[in-house]
Image: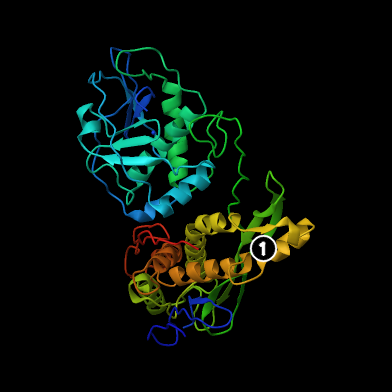
Amino acid sequence: MQRKCDCGDLAEDKERSAPIQRLTAGSGESSAAPRFGHNFGDVRVHHPGPQTVQRSSPESARAKTEAAYFDDEPEDEHAKIERPVAPDAPPIGSGRALPEPVRARMETAFEADFSEVRIHEGPEAGSIGAAAYTRGTDIHFAPGRYDLSSRPGQQLLGHELTHVVQQRAGRVPIPQAKGGAIVQDSGLEAEADVLGAKAARGGPVRVQGSTSGLRGGSTQGVLRPVQCAGITWNAANYSSDAAAGSSTTVEEPFNITYKASQNKAKTAWNLQVDSISGGVDIKVHTGGSRDPVATPPTTEAEAKDAVTVMKGYYARGKRGTWHTEAASQAHEMHHYKEWKCSANHYWPPTEKALKKLSVPTAGAATEADAITALRAGAGGADAKMTAFKDKAHDYWFTLADNAKSRPYAAGQLVLNSAIKGVQALATTNKWTVPKGTNSPSAASPCYKGWLKYSP
């Protein structure tokens, strides 16, 4: 099956075949527990009173889509100020668990178990002037602030989950006070700012003094889980030639290695992911297009044509008779960004499922035997990896690759430098050519909403 736009010989295409590929750029929670409150934008650290909590006032409404969850741009710095807080602690309700995809991603980032975390939305946080606050494993959000579809909302959740882990690690002082604990450690707040933002971007975080996988803060009789293995992404294997045809971005097979360890009773082997890496092969064909950098226009007519054709790349959705290899490379590299975030989205629940696989020691004398057995069968590791790759690939192919789409924006931004070069040449030769460039706004590679996945 293939998808191809009807754009003529120089269309930027994507096509499914064996191997699967994208063809583009073508030619063509307790009451005595401490509480935290937080709001991204301003973090308030308060002086103790009869009842004091850390909280912050509401900020602006959401401005970005769920794509921000995958974005890896640096965060803004936050100003800090102080304010008093209302004295009464709101009651704790039953709450609801984190959505599975969100929980899986955050558990992977923090190396922690958030199965007991409960989310509450209501007037409690607002009654103390907070966007959100944490008490034990209960996180309270003001109405409209539990927003997983925006960057600030994801950061806010990450910040509060950092407080959950800080409490488990015993790092939160609990001075005696009527009605609850006082928390006024600006260091904890600063740590939660940084780590919460990093977790929201999908990066691994380590809360100082934490013990992975613990609930409630006790370290006795609890096994620490193996650290989760994030995907290591290799540099793209890039090549180009002067042939005609569609440029391609083809995902390489994932290279995954396993380990196996026995449980405490030594009755079963459990699978562990030792490492996983991936990459792509990018092939750019330049046939059919003239590079204005390598072969500049020699007449006013050629210069006009070059500027007009290159300025129209993003809106046209295909490269034209004037184009550069660098622009096609940027187009294809954007597809690699999309592939990374697509696979990164589906990997945490996949690894979680792999780590649940076990085989009796009676049937596997050695670790090598255990790994072989754990990989085999319809429900084995190999089958789960195939399903993971297929899911990620199908998601990847839902991302637009036509006129005014993100890959074309990436190419256009690079092509603009060639446009400026021709315009400078025209100025020197006193030619009249179109002015300006075409600068579509930059956007994160993946922008669709959460897709639930339970392998």
Q: Is residue 372 left or right of residue 435?
A: right
Q: Which image quarter: residue 404?
A: bottom left
- Residue 299, image x, y percentages: 43, 77
* Vertical arrangement, residue 134 with respect to residue 424, above or below: above
Q: Is residue 208 left or right of residue 29?
A: right
Query: What type is the residue that disc 1 sits on?
Result: Leu
Residue at (26, 19) in percent of width and height: 83
Residue at (40, 87) in percent of width and height: 8
**In this orientation, which residue lies closer to the viewer: 281 or 348?**
348
Residue placed under numbered mark 1 in the picture: 374
**In this orientation, which residue lies closer to the viewer: 230 or 169?**
169
Q: Among all residues in the image, which is located at the extreme right?
A: 365
- Can residue 234 be seen from the camera position used here? no
- Residue 448, image x, y percentages: 36, 62
Q: Is residue 414 left or right of residue 134?
A: right
Protein image colouring: rainbow
Question: For the image shown, how many numbered marks are present on the structure?
Answer: 1
- Can residue 66 be seen from the camera position used here? yes
- Residue 346, image x, y percentages: 49, 60
* Vertical arrangement, residue 299 with respect to residue 40, above or below: below
**In this orientation, which residue lies closer to the viewer: 295 or 49?**
49
- Residue 276, image x, y percentages: 63, 58
* Vertical arrangement, residue 343 with respect to residue 22, above or below: above
Instruction: Classify 10 Å Cα crowding around label 1: few (below 14), some (14-19), many (20 and above).
Output: many
SS class, disc 1: helix
Residue at (29, 40) in percent of width and height: 120
